[in-house]
Amino acid sequence: MADYLTVNVVTPDGLVYEHHARLVVARTIDGELGILPKHAPIIAPLEIDEVRVKRTESDTHVDWVAVNGGILEVRDNIVSIIADSAERERDIDVSRAERARMRAEKLIEKAKEEHNVDELKRATVALHRAINRINVSKHH
């Protein structure tokens, strides 16, 4: 078996990321998960968070991907992440993410004033996604 992982991040828009890695770290709903080569097969739901990929070329080469939830599957040294949306740190439009953050914060305030629980949940998820993108962009 290979001494590296093949990492794929796929969204409905297609392949966002594909590289070989020594280590992948992702946040599942049960906590942080580190994946090394020869990891046992697993399927886990992901939180809205960053995925860290330590590439094979060098110990200091790390890629960051903002993942907005989804599923992680590990099988035969292949790490597949299927997400509604995902962006590499270098592809994030920071000003757009900042505008999304501000929009979500305003929606949260409005939803709290109106006691609209559903809108509050939606706006909170939107805020979390925007903050995740902003945080990941800082790794670039």
Image (cartoon, rainbow, N blue to C red):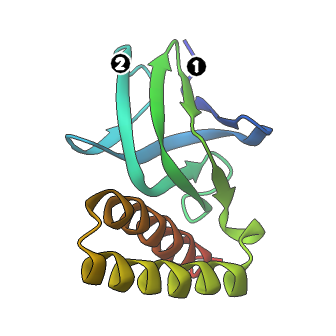
Q: Are marks 1 and 2 in contact (CB under 8 Å)?
A: no
Q: Residue at x 67, y 57 (%)?
A: 87
- Image quarter where the C terminus lies is bottom right
Count residues near mark 2 (Cα–Cα under 10 Å), then give few for <14, some for 14-19, many for 20+.
few
As displayed, is residue 79 above or below residue 57?
above
Foreground: 100 or 40? Answer: 100
Foreground label between 1 and 2: 2
Judging by the rendered image, the residue that carries numbered circle 2 is 42
**Residue 131 at what x, y percent from top left?**
47, 75
User: Does residue 4 appear anywhere in the picture?
Assistant: no
Mark positioned earlier in the residue sequence (1 or 2): 1
Q: What SS does tag 1 mark?
A: loop
Residue extending farthest to the left is 30
Q: Nearer the viewer, residue 71 or 39?
A: 71
The amino acid marked with disc number 1 is Ala
Residue 49 percent location from the top left of the image: 42, 58
On the image, numbered disc 1 is attached to which residue?
Answer: 2
Disc 2 marks a residue whose amino acid type is Ile
- Note whether 82 is above or below 38 in the view shown: below
Query: In the image, 27: left or right of 19?
Result: left
Label total for image? 2
**Within the image, what quadrant is residue 89 found in?**
bottom right
